[in-house]
Image (cartoon, helix red, strand yellow):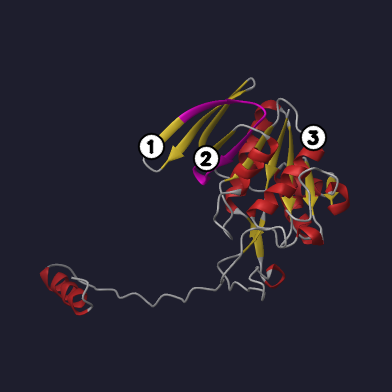
Amino acid sequence: MKIIVTVKQVPDTSGKVAVNPDGTLNRASMETIINPDDLNATEAALKLKDEYGCKVVAFTMGPPPAEGMLRELMAMGVDEGVLITAREFGGSDTYATSQIIAAAIDTYGIDEDDIVICGRQAIDGDTAQVGPQIAEKLHLPQVSYAGELVKEGNTLTIKRMLEDGYMTIKVKTPCLITCIKELNEPRYLSVHGAFEAYSKPLVIMDYAALKDHPLIDETTIGLKGSPTNIFKSFTPPQKGVGMMLEGAGKETTDKLAGILAAKHII
């Protein structure tokens, strides 16, 4: 059994977001981090590895510097990294991205007892589309928004969290799961793991490695093959400083009521 985790290197949105003229993010000019939900997916995979001794492989699509992110995940306990990188893949939207990652996973190989785990969504797009699209293109059963996960043999019992409750679903492997942050608390990388990270295998999949796969076509990958067009991207204006009212009792509440009335809120 092996567990495939999909991860993404995303811009640190706490800083200024730079945008190219074509509407895509200028990732080279921004600090990057590992997508937070993908860390929860990685932790879910590592917990299964701790219990069953399985292999964990992290897949990411991005520029060559994304290797550093994969090495960081290896320091946490991931056994192998797969970097999907090519100029032909640049500018892909969720549809094109899922085409490419699904082709890479299929090329790498997925067996009857394997599991694919994804984070719920990435903070740079917030679409929550790539994981489910990968499942559709690989013809895998999928369960999204996993808040609890228990494995028994080739069956996973998953507590799927909804806005007004939850669903308990059982699914057999191979399957794809997308998880939420409430599933676990990601572990820190260890010093020993950091030393071992650079001795673990890293597979590079470029356009030449994937171009013959049925999912890869110049009309369905990259910016030209992306049906989504970005109309406008911008950094929202910073909110003004809040007002603090000190004190207690009727005098303070009357003052608050007067402020709200002046702003026509009440």
Q: Earlier in the sequence, mark 2 or mark 3?
A: 3
18 above or below 9?
below
**Is 102 positioned to the left or the right of 161 in the image?**
right
Residue 150 appears anywhere in the view: yes
Residue 75 appears anywhere in the view: no
**Is 206 positioned to the left or the right of 266 in the image?**
right
Q: Specify few, some or many for label 3: CA neighbours under 10 Å numbering under 14, 14-19, or 20 or more.
A: few
Q: Which residue is painted at 55% across and 44% down in the image? A: 185
User: Which segment did they paint magenta?
Assistant: 168-182
Q: Residue 246: horizontal and vertical position, in percent?
A: 23, 73
Residue in the foreground of this view, choosing between 255 and 64: 64
User: Real-space Cα distance between discs 1 and 2?
Assistant: 15 Å
Q: Residue 203: horizontal and vertical position, in percent?
A: 84, 46
Residue holding disc 3 = 109
Which label was assigned to residue 183?
2
Q: Residue furthest right?
A: 208
Q: Nearer the viewer, mark 1 or mark 2?
A: 1
Q: Amino acid at mark 1?
A: Gly
